[in-house]
Every structure is written in structure tokens, then in C-alpha cells.
Image: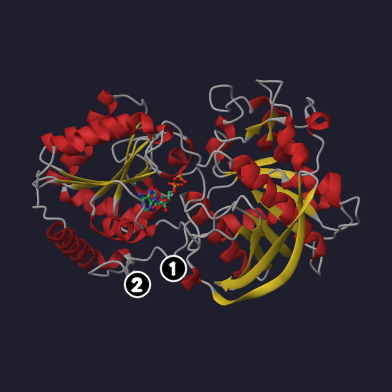
Amino acid sequence: MRIVHVATEFAPLAKVGGLGDVVHGLAKEQAALGHQVEVILPKYDIIKYHNLENFSLEMGDLWSFEDSSRYHNAVWTGYVDKVKVHLIEPHHNHYYFNRGKIYGTADDVERFLYFCRAAGEFLHLQRGRPDIIHLHDWPTAPLAPIIKHIYKDLGFSYGSIVLTIHNIEHQGKCSPANLSRIGLRGEDFRSEERLQDPKDPSVINLLKGGIVYSDSFTTVSPTYAKEIMTPSSGFGLDGIVRLFESNFKGILNGIELDSWNPASDPFISFPYPTNSTFIETIIKNKEANKESLFKKLNMTPSKGPLIACISRLAKQKGPKLILHAIQYALKQNGSFILLGSSIDPEFEKEFGELQQLYKGNPHFHMKLSFDEAFSHSLFAAADAIFIPSLFEPCGLTQMIGMRYGTIPIARKTGGLSDTVFDADNSKIPLVNRNGFTFDNPDTTSVERVLKRAMSCYETDKKKWKQLIQTDLNTDFSWKKSALAYDQIYAQALSKTSDFKVA
Ligand code: ADP
């Protein structure tokens, strides 16, 4: 099958969070399964070119459209892990992708709508028919109506369109005029059966457009799939998800085992195997990584465990609970390292104050930036990883943590519910218990769960060791998920075309 992902992130070229990891991991596994896999991305100024092989100009002259004007684009190409990447570079006076960051500019909607139209034009001009065009989240969801209302009529031939919702909170709400700028008459699309927002009838909802116009759509865990069909978690789109439920499935993400491998991780000082029979070496080297990180950060060891939190500091991730956990863990003789990025302005002051409060505390370190290298060394050094999300579509840090023998302490929601099983819950078979969980997103529950985890680390080494072994034995590879996507693709193709699956 020829599969083309159209996305706004792709690790290791351009990543803000899990989306980048997921598009990379899935595409790489699909290539390993024998598919021809391509990814179309904006050519951001922040692309990490050293990760791209055979980088070259692919198409010097791609003309696209915005506001009745024609704009010139160049398309560059290269390979990451046998996946062919196409980078669209607009020659546009608004320098859409030269902003030093991927998201968070006032014109995000315009930038990504422009990208979708240019990607549609590129797909139409390219030789070869894609079997699957796979879209990811609101920024590329509009390509579904663009293809079905513009390029199909121009003779563009393809198999099916699939959309994956990585986070339903972000929907790309905009005015009908935004849509008109790229050639879909906005007012015609502001109707209930098309792109009209279910909550605010005056606006266009781009993610809804992806759901309505794709042939199948998915989200990133089975529990989150159920959650977003309810009013409390659907952010207004639960009714639309329910309406198209027969085309919808939750498929748990995997993690990319070569990038996340403590045995060969270039960012860690003391590599260690992932085979749990070598548990003593694993524990010894994890301890050595901890010592080395402590030395680097001017920290001293504590009696209790080193707890890490590696997260965007958005409301979704429970910043207030993170702040509380830091104070509680330090009071209980633990250590805490926070690596936080994209800090929500609402919480800037509180994290700043906490940094001041614990300035010079030898058991605490906080870094407020995105730092891939530091994240790897922290996964390897920490004893536990704390994930108190208010909601979590899938979550990757619990799985990466487990791959590094770092015990997850997580709130039971979305994909965290599908992957973390409490060490003290007698209803769960012993062999599946792999971390510590809590239900309610409040400070009392945070204290209770930390108390249980910290006491297990300090007083029951045997149980802690067993948890590490269970975590290391869990298969989080992309294989199972990629095969599940194959099934989704086959179903979508059987619905939409004369394509016969072999
Ligand atoms: P989300 O996609 O909602 O941010 P996920 O848990 O799905 O959350 O994925 C987060 C990914 O981003 C993981 O690979 C994690 O290691 C990485 N990450 C999060 N914050 C940082 C940070 N501050 N520095 C480096 N990597 C980070």
C-alpha cells in the first residue's frame, strides 16, 4: 500500500510532543511491514536537518492558492528511517513556517490551512496514486474536505482518507472567511452536516471537518475513544464522534524502540539492557545514571526515590498537581526533577515561585524548556515518572518510562488507564501490575499515591524490583498498532473504492 501521512510534527525533524513521536513510530513500522510510506510536512525553519538523509530539491515549482492569489512553493525531500519525507516551503510574504516554533502564533489557522491546500496541490501533481492519505489532528484535518471538494473534481485519484485525533481539545475553530481564503467557500461549509461548530454556529470547526469528510477516523487509545463520545470529554464534538461511531476506533500508540532504548541511548552515561533477566545490572546502572545526573545538576542523593516529570505544562497535564507533588515528595525525603515545556501563562507565576522557594535545595531541579537530550538522561536516571493528567489521549511518558525501568505513577484516565495498572490492586493479576495509579485529580489523591509509591521504594525492594521487571517485559512496540491501522485502512478502502485488499 502507498500510505501518505500529512502532519505538522515528525520526530526527530520537528517535535513538540507525542504527535511527532507517533507519526514517526507509526510510519517507520509501516515501512518495515512493507508499505511505501511518505510524510508531508511544512518546511519549518526549526527542522533538524542532520536527521534527514539524501536531502534534495524535489519540486522547484509548486503553485498554491490563498485569497485568489497564486503562491510559489518549493518541495524538498529526504529520508528518515526509509520513510520519504516531503517538506513544503512556501514562498509567501507571511513567512508561515519561519517563526522559530511550530504552534502558538496568532495566525496558526491561516498557516496550516495554507499548508493543507499546498499539500493537496502537491498530492494531485505527484506521480502515483496514494492508497491512504492519513491526516493528524486539526491542522491537517481540512485536507479531507479540500480533496473531496477540489481535487477529486480535478481528477485526483486516491484510495481513502483516514484521520487520527491525537487530542480532541484542539479543534481549529475559525471564521468561514478563513476557509474561503484557501478555496472552499466558507459560508457553504458552515452547515450542520459540514464544518459548522456544534457549540458556536457562527464558526467553522476544522477538526469536525476531518471527522465528517474522512472515510475512517481513529484516536490513540481505546479508553480515550470511549471518553470522547461523552459530553464531559468531547469538548463539544462528542455528538459528531457518536454520529460517525461506525467509522471510529481507538488504537493504542506504541513507542519507537530504537529511539527509546537504554542499551544504546547516546544521551545516557551508563547504558543498560532491557532484558529483565539482567535486573541486577539494570538496577546498578540506573543508580549510576542517577549519581551522574545528580553530580551534573549539583544535587545530592535523598533517602527516597528520584521522581521525574517530563511534560508540556499545559492545563491538561495537571500543573497544579505537579506543583503539589514536588512539595510533597521533597517533604517525604524524595528527590524531584521537573522538565517542563510550553508553560501555560496561567501557571508561569506559580512555577517561578516554586523555583525561588527551592533555590539551592539539593533534592530538586527544574528546567523549563524542551530538551530532548535531558529527557533521555532523566528517563534513565529516575526511579519513577509522575503523570497526573486531567485527561490523556494516550500518553507516551508512562510507556517510555517503563522501557527505562522507571515506574509510572499516573492518573487513571484515557491511555494511562489502558497501560498503567496499580501495584496494590488485588483485582489486577500480579503479572500485570506495573505502576501506581490514582483516580481523582486532587491533592489528597496525589499525596496518597506518592506515599504508597515512595514507601514501596524505601521498604519493599523486592516488590519494586518486580515492578521494574514487569515494566521491562511489556511490549510497547509499534507492531501491534501498525497492524491495527492496516485493518482500519482495509476497512476504509473497502467502503470507498474498488480497491481489493490482497
Ligand atoms: P503530549 O503529546 O500531550 O505532549 P505525550 O506523553 O503523548 O504528551 O508525549 C510527550 C512526548 O514529548 C514524549 O516523548 C516526552 O518525552 C516529550 N516531552 C514532553 N515534554 C518534554 C520536554 N520538556 N523536553 C523534552 N521532551 C519532552
Task: Characterize the local packing of mark 1: few (<14), some (14-19) or many (20 or more) Cα atoms within 10 angstroms.
Answer: few
Give the SS element for disc 1: loop
Closest to the observer, 162 or 344: 344
Rendered location of residue 501, percent (x, y): 80, 61
Q: Which residue appears at 14% of the width and 42% of the height?
A: 334
Q: Which label number is shown at residue 264?
A: 2
Rendered location of residue 59, percent (x, y): 72, 70
The C terminus appears in which quarter of the rendering?
Answer: bottom right
Rendered location of residue 471, percent (x, y): 35, 54
CB atoms at circles 1 and 2 under 8 Å apart? Answer: yes
Q: Which residue appears at 78% of the width and 33% of the height?
A: 186
- Its colouring scheme is secondary structure
Rendered location of residue 96, percent (x, y): 60, 51
* Comes first in the chain, label 1 or label 2: 1
User: Would you say residue 33 is visible in this rendering?
Assistant: no
Amino acid identity at mark 1: Asp
Closest to the observer, 12 or 477: 12
The N terminus appears in which quarter of the rendering?
Answer: bottom right
Q: Is residue 30 above or below residue 150?
A: below
Q: Is residue 203 left or right of residue 298?
A: right
Q: Is residue 458 above or below residue 25?
A: above
User: Would you say residue 360 is visible in this rendering?
Assistant: yes
What distance separates the C-alpha of mark 1 from that of mark 2? Answer: 8 Å
Closest to the observer, 454 or 67: 67
Amino acid identity at mark 2: Ser
Q: Is residue 51 above or below residue 105?
A: below
Badge 2 residue CB within 8 Å of ligand 1: no
The residue at the far front in this view is 93
To which residue does mark 1 refer?
A: 258
Closest to the observer, 265 or 436: 265
